[in-house]
Amino acid sequence: MAEDIANEIQQMLKEAWGNFCDYHKKYAPEYPKLWEFNEKKAKESHWICWNEYDLMFHIGRHFYDILRKKKEDIYSNIEMHFEKNVNRNNFEDYEFEDRLGKLNKILNMKRGPKIDLIIAYESRNRPFLLCAEVKCFHSPAERYYKTAIDKIREDIEKLKAIREYKIAQSVVFMLFDDYYWCTKGNEEKANNIKHELERIEKEEGILVLPFTSEAKLEKYKQPMWVQT
């Protein structure tokens, strides 16, 4: 039963992500027109999700819209939380408390990994229903990492550890690319990201939800991903 609910929560999050994508596709094309931007300026500008926090907010509001329609008692007391360190200070007396030391060690994090998004029962001390990492590329990841893929892989290692130590029943990775796919000179990097996401889903067994800001350039007829 618990596994069924976790799977359902994952599907609800996937639906929420799809609803956000539809929302972005509907409204993003309007802003370059209102600002009367040319193609270059439109590519460099960000609308709807200025940063990762905006992205998580949109995911949350769409998820709660779906959750609110569920009438069964099993869906009560479910909440979504953002950016929480998973450690003993925050989750004392949870079933997975004795595994947090190993989790910190394998990830080399003294304060415990900070998870972007957690969906959990508020009234239970059991493993989370779902943990997700959420990335919004709106500038070069290379400012802090060797490559964008290094940044992605760091999150994937975190999710794999969360899953391995049974901190959460389900893990998901979400990526909104508002930079690489539409920035001149980054065609190869955009393709590398695309192929890495495909590899993660196939080899790591982690649900990957990708999206780009293609809609903002609708009138310019740009491709969503560079084809190889």
Image (cartoon, rainbow, N blue to C red):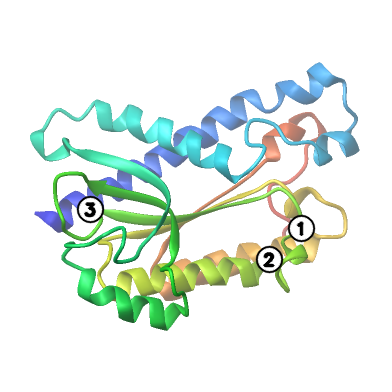
Camera-nearest residue between 124 and 153: 124
Residue 175, given in percent of the width and then of the height, sits at 56, 53
What residue type is disc 2 on?
Ala
- Establish if 214 lies above or below 30: below
Whether tag 1 and tag 2 are in contact, CB under 8 A, the answer is yes
Q: Disc 1 marks which amino acid?
A: Pro
For image coordinates 70% across by 64% down, the residue present is 191
Residue 36 lies in quadrant: top right
Work out which quarter of the rendered image holds the N terminus and state it.
bottom left
Q: What residue lies at 31% left-to-right and 31% top-to-bottom?
A: 66
Where's residue 174, x and y in %? Answer: 50, 53
The location of residue 113, given as percent across then percent down, is 43, 66
Q: What residue is pinned by disc 3?
A: 6
Q: Quadrant of residue 53?
A: top right
Q: Which residue is mark 2?
A: 148
- Would you call the spot at circle 2 few (<14 residues within 10 Å), some (14-19), or many (20 or more)? some
Other residues around mark 3 within 10 Å, as few (<14) / some (14–19) / many (≥20)? many
Residue drawn at x 46%, y 33% is 19
Determine the secondary structure under disc 1.
loop
For the residues labelled 1 and 2, the Cα–Cα distance comes to 8 Å
Compare marks 1 and 2 and give the one earlier in the sequence.
1
Dot placed on the residue nearer the N-terminal end, 2 or 3:
3
Between marks 1 and 3, how big is the CA–CA gap?
Answer: 34 Å
On the picture, is 5 further left or further right than 177?
left
Residue with the mark numbered 1: 140
Give neighbour class at mark 1: few <14, some 14-19, many 20+ (Cα, 10 Å). Answer: some
Amino acid at pointer 3: Ala
Mark sitting earlier along the chain (1/3): 3
Q: Residue at x 28, y 62 (%)?
A: 168
Q: Is residue 91 left or right of residue 113?
A: left
